[in-house]
Image (tube, rainbow, N blue to C red):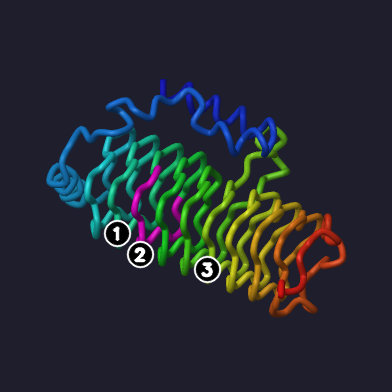
């Protein structure tokens, strides 16, 4: 059932952004025990981590139901959490660096202050999750983060752009619709063709970020640093482009889409 739900989500993502943002949960029963309950305790998880360390490898929690657990502060570096369910789980300050989070579920999970450096997040569903202050440097978040908070988070070097070299997956993208990215570090982040419509990017550092073909319609970039950022074909309809830093050094600034519909002055 989980595999079918994920395949359906991939098909929706490939079909187009307007459909993708609405139907990532297509086919998934979010009220089922598999999505809302845990099959083990924190103590059980700690025991598995200890056993894995004794063997000299990372813990394997793939496919486990861990929703609602408090796993804050645990060392889950390199852990295999592929297809695991951690909805509403607490992972405050947890180290998930290099972890495999592909096709996993983190809906309304609390990952504030967590480390997810270079984490693999292809196909992740993390709607309304809290990543405030988390470190996602060089992570690969190709998934659904609609409504999540990355306030003050480090996303430098993030690899969230669509891979246009792979035609079968060419439209897979990061969905940051209505996401809070205020004050986030997005230096050098690849968000090409990403969904950033209605995102809060106030004061964000977008230095050298790739926004080529991204949907920034309705986004708020007030006070953001856009020096060196690539805006080629980025849709800025209704976006607030006020008090930008480094605007004169942004790349392909004149190649924005719907530039005449952007808000460039403060409302009195």
What is the magenta range? Answer: 107-119
Query: Which secondary structure type mostly characterizes the magenta part of the structure?
Result: loop
Q: Position of residue 155 (x, y in %)?
A: 52, 64
Q: Earlier in the sequence, mark 1 or mark 2?
A: 1
Local SS, label 1 = loop
Local SS, label 2 = loop
**Against 8, is 18 above or below?**
below
Residue 117 within the segment the image draws in magenta: yes
Residue at (72, 35) in percent of width and height: 167
Tell me if label 1 and label 2 are in contact, CB under 8 Å.
Answer: yes
Residue 168 within the segment the image draws in magenta: no
Q: Residues within 10 Å of mark 2 (few under 14, many from 20)?
A: many
Is 154 positioned to the left or the right of 65 in the image? right
Q: Position of residue 218 (x, y in %)?
A: 68, 56
Dot label at residue 114: none
Dot label at residue 92: 1
Q: Quadrant of the N terminus?
A: top left
Dot label at residue 184: 3
CA–CA distance in space, label 1 to label 2 = 6 Å
CA–CA distance in space, label 2 to label 3 = 13 Å
Instruction: Find disc 2 in the rendering and name its residue.
Output: 113
Picture quadrant where residue 64 is located? top left
Is 147 positioned to the left or the right of 101 in the image? right
**Against 251, is 82 above or below?**
above
């Amino acid at each position: 059932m989980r595999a079918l739900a994920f395949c359906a989500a991939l098909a929706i993502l490939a079909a187009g952004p307007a459909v993708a943002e609405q139907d990532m949960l297509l086919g998934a029963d979010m009220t089922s025990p598999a999505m809302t309950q845990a099959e083990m305790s924190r103590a059980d998880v700690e025991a598995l981590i200890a056993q894995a360390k004794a063997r000299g490898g990372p813990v394997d929690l793939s496919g486990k139901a861990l929703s609602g657990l408090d796993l804050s502060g645990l060392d889950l570096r390199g852990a295999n959490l592929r297809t695991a369910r951690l909805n509403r789980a607490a992972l405050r300050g947890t180290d998930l660096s290099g972890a495999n989070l592909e096709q996993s579920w983190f809906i309304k999970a609390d990952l504030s202050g967590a480390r997810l450096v270079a984490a693999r997040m292809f196909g992740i569903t993390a709607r309304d999750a809290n990543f405030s202050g988390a470190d996602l440097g060089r992570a690969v978040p190709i998934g659904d983060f609609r409504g999540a908070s990355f306030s003050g988070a480090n996303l430098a070097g993030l690899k969230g752009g669509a891979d246009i070299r792979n035609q079968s997956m060419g439209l897979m993208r990061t969905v940051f619709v209505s996401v809070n990215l205020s004050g986030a570090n997005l230096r050098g982040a690849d968000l090409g063709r990403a969904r950033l419509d209605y995102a809060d990017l106030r004061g964000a550092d977008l230095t050298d970020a790739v926004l080529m073909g991204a949907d920034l319609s309705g986004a708020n970039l007030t006070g953001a640093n856009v020096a060196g950022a690539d805006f080629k074909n980025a849709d800025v309809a209704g976006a607030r482009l006020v008090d930008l830093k480094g605007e004169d050094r942004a790349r392909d600034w004149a190649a924005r889409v719907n530039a005449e519909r952007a808000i460039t002055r403060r409302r009195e």
